């Protein structure tokens, strides 16, 4: 089943994208620039979400990890 049709997988992919983009932006700030358009512009927006909402993203990652490790069959 694709991650687009499974809500739990979609949330997991979204959280991983946010965390990955924020990490890449911390290493190479010029790679993800706010003046870029297209896919790199979208990645910049995900990195910005990861930077500004980091406590909520971290809680979401912990909740997804607990659910994946202990509650899913």
Image (spheres, helix red, strand yellow):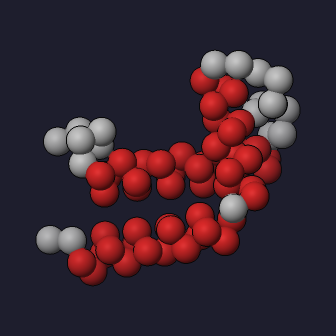
Say which quarter of the image contains residue 29.
top right
Q: Residue at x 31, y 70 (%)?
A: 68
Q: Nearer the viewer, residue 13 or 56?
A: 56
- The residue depicted at 68 percent of the width and 51 percent of the height is 49
In the rendering, at what x and y percent does residue 25 appear? 76, 44
- 40 sits to left or right of 33: left
User: Which of the image's four quarters has the C terminus?
Assistant: bottom left
Q: Position of residue 43 (x, y in %)?
A: 64, 35
Q: Is residue 46 above or below residue 38?
A: below
Residue 36 in which image quadrant: top right
Horizontal side, residue 42 vs residue 48: left or right: left
Where the N terminus falls, by quadrant?
top left
Residue drawn at (59%, 64%) of the image: 57
- The residue lying toward the viewer, choosing from 6 and 16, is 6
Residue 71 in which image quadrant:
bottom left
Q: Could you tell me which residue is drawn at 69 percent across and 39 percent down?
A: 45
- How many circles with numbers are drawn on the protein? 0
Question: Horizontal and vertical percent for residue 69?
Answer: 30, 75
Residue 23, percent across and down?
69, 52
> Is 53 above or below relative to 25?
below
């Amino acid at each position: 089943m694709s991650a687009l049709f499974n809500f739990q997988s979609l949330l997991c992919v979204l959280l991983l994208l946010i965390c990955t983009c924020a990490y890449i932006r911390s290493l190479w700030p010029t790679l993800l620039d706010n003046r870029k358009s297209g896919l790199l512009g979208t990645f910049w927006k995900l990195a910005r979400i990861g930077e500004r909402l980091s406590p909520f993203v971290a809680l979401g990652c912990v909740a997804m990890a607990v659910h994946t490790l202990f509650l899913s069959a």
